[in-house]
Amino acid sequence: MNLVLHDYWRSSAAYRVRIALNLKGLDYAQISHDLRKGAQRDPAYVALNPLGRVPMLDADGLMLTQSLAIIEWLEETHPKPPLLPGTANERAIVRAMAQLVACDIHPLNNLAVLQTLRRRFDADEEAVNAWIAHWIAQGFGALETMIARHGGTFAFGEAPTMADCCVVPQLYSARRFGVDLRKFPRIVAVGEACAALHTFDAADPARQPDADP
Amino acid sequence: MNLVLHDYWRSSAAYRVRIALNLKGLDYAQISHDLRKGAQRDPAYVALNPLGRVPMLDADGLMLTQSLAIIEWLEETHPKPPLLPGTANERAIVRAMAQLVACDIHPLNNLAVLQTLRRRFDADEEAVNAWIAHWIAQGFGALETMIARHGGTFAFGEAPTMADCCVVPQLYSARRFGVDLRKFPRIVAVGEACAALHTFDAADPARQPDADP
């Protein structure tokens, strides 16, 4: 199967999919769309991906969008190693952790939203950073509790899951925006366990071919 | 199985789960948390659901959070009738439609975000409504194209899916906030097809016991 990831090094959602592809041991090519220049709104790309966002995974011409839908598809088509645990009840917890990041934290601090805050509300950098820190701290507070209840070395148990695919990119963003992480020692420990794995390290924004020097 | 939905009539995410429970033919009790009064931040509730949001589904004491994780759990534990289509490629499309609503539209117009815009950026009602309309129009533009490609009577094909569970509550919000829907005839048609079904109609905010008179 020929896999091409439409990507951007600093996109948190694309970073999730890079981790998942690496955990599945799948080779993929990358096409970068520079979000700072609005390249994702190029008509040729929007014709394939109507929302004009990254990531999109081109799998033999099938155009897959939305990071968690892509990861579920990878899980169904390449079951080993699993990124979801073995029972429905456990899978519900892992998916809830992933969606806590993907629905309740990340959408409020992606680039398009921050640009809109600046444009519509004349928000300065201090106000934008406070906005980001507010949503990350609120979400991370809940995530820290979930990891205390269900986590081990990783966000859920002793092997990486879809939850870690979301937590690690969100932790990268939190650090980038200078969010105080001292209240979230379990999230930080999960991040360290993941960073020690080649699969996560190779997905790191700084390791991508389109990263700023 | 004893199902109790922690709910609020106007919550878009809770509305998704009500539809899914009805489509699965499952009986459930409801406990309302008045989001306008901040009831979801009550410590007894937060002890069960660390993020302090609705919905949460109590399934024989298992506390399930995040609307799409709950719907995936319902799909796995009560497979009939299916809310996801039969192939991995088709499921990826339905999940992408659901996540387009749940990750790219709804998080930007939920009550907590609108309250924060007012508080932090002194946004007046006109500015808040323009913010809401911006994100709904952007997301609905992409969704309209996806329905053109993959839809039929419903958002995907000829039977209700997880996508419709998300589209219908978002359409309700769009109307509530006065968003111009003339550019989205396919979304509106899907909404009409769904509204004709008892399963969707019974989940409508106005039909809930905690709705404003």
Image (cartoon, coloured by chain):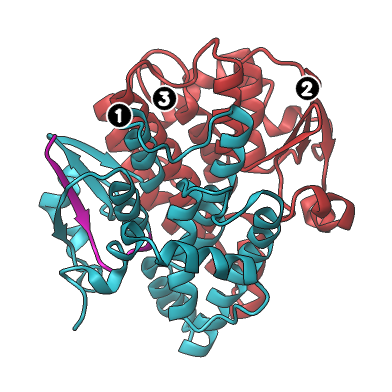
Chain colours: A red, B cyan
User: Mark 2 = which residue?
Assistant: A28
Left or right: A165 as drawn, with respect to B65? right
Q: Position of residue B196 (x, y in %)?
A: 40, 66
Pick whichever, B163 or B132, lies toward us: B163
Specify the subunit that label 2 lies on.
A
Report the magenta residues as a range.
B1-12
Q: Amino acid at mark 3?
A: Ala
Q: Residues within 10 Å of mark 1 (few under 14, many from 20)?
A: few
Q: Position of residue B171 (x, y in %)?
A: 48, 69
Q: Using the image, determine if residue B145 lies above or below residue B73.
A: below
Q: Quadrant of the C terminus of chain A?
A: top right
User: Mark 1 = which residue?
Assistant: B77
Residue at horizontal 28 percent and vertical 47 percent from the top:
B21
Could one spot residue A124 in this view of the protein? no
Q: Nearer the viewer, mark 2 or mark 3?
A: 2
The numbered disc on residue A112 is none
The residues tagged by marks 2 and 1 sit, at their Cα atoms, a distance apart of 34 Å
Q: Position of residue B161 (x, y in %)?
A: 47, 46
Q: Give SS at disc 1.
A: helix
